[in-house]
Amino acid sequence: MSSFRQSALVPFSSAQMYSLVNDIELYPEFLPWCSRAKIIENSESQVNAELTVSKGPFTYNFSTTNLLVPNKSIDLKLLKGPFKFFRGHWVFNDDSRGCFVRLSIDYEASTPLLRMALSMASGAVVDSLIKSFVTRAHEKY
């Protein structure tokens, strides 16, 4: 299993950062590797969404259930996709200087080809995640 952790202190509130992360359908506008995002089901406490991830010659679709604690956290659990296991966790904590954002992702690829693709691209993708959201926050707020 592979794991990634990333965090950043940003000059925005937890409500603002939570809102950006939860606005899934806009991901293709600012996440360079996300070519499509679709909400399947939406409620106050949960969002089911499907993403299409494209990096180089590789394109994969996967869907998650996102359990929401407004302005505090978003837990992602795999519904379907090319993973044996996939889980993610966003946490948003207000700080006197803004918001401390943390992202953790744990996954295991289901095929050797996906393992190879992820080993080549996942570091760059995960590294770009929070940076992309922070850039988007600067544009929006």
Image (tube, rainbow, N blue to C red):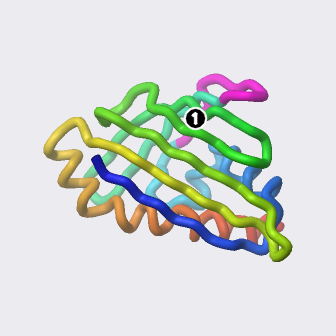
Majority SS type along the magenta span: strand
In front of the other: 29 or 48: 48
Q: Residue at x 40, y 47 (%)?
A: 106
Q: Residue at x 75, y 59 (%)?
A: 93
Q: Position of residue 25 (x, y in %)?
A: 64, 42
Query: Which image quadrant: the C terminus?
Result: bottom right
As drawn, 37 above or below 26 = above
Q: Position of residue 112 (x, y in %)?
A: 14, 44
- For label 1, the crowd category at 10 Å Cα-Cα, with few meaning under 14, some 14 to 19 and many 20 or more, is some
Q: Which residue does the numbered mark 1 point to in the structure image?
A: 38
Q: Secondary structure at mark 1?
A: strand
Q: Is residue 31 magenta?
A: no
In front of the other: 104 or 57: 104
As drawn, 141 above or below 18 = below
Task: Judge from the rendering whether residue 45 lies leftward or rightward of residue 122; answer left or right.
Answer: right
Residue 95, picture quadrant: bottom right
Counting labels gives: 1
Q: Which residues are magenta?
A: 37-46
As drawn, 27 above or below 128 = above
Q: Is residue 38 magenta?
A: yes
Q: Position of residue 71 (x, y in %)?
A: 79, 48
Q: Position of residue 135 (x, y in %)?
A: 66, 71
Task: Judge from the rendering whether residue 41 lies leftward or rightward of residue 44; answer left or right.
Answer: left
Q: Residue at x 28, y 46 (%)?
A: 1
Q: Residue at x 41, y 58 (%)?
A: 4
Task: Judge from the rendering whether residue 94 lies leftward or rightward of residue 58; answer left or right.
Answer: right
The residue sitting at the left extreme is 112
Residue 78, picture quadrant: top left
Residue 9, picture quadrant: bottom right
- Identified by mark 1, the residue type is Lys
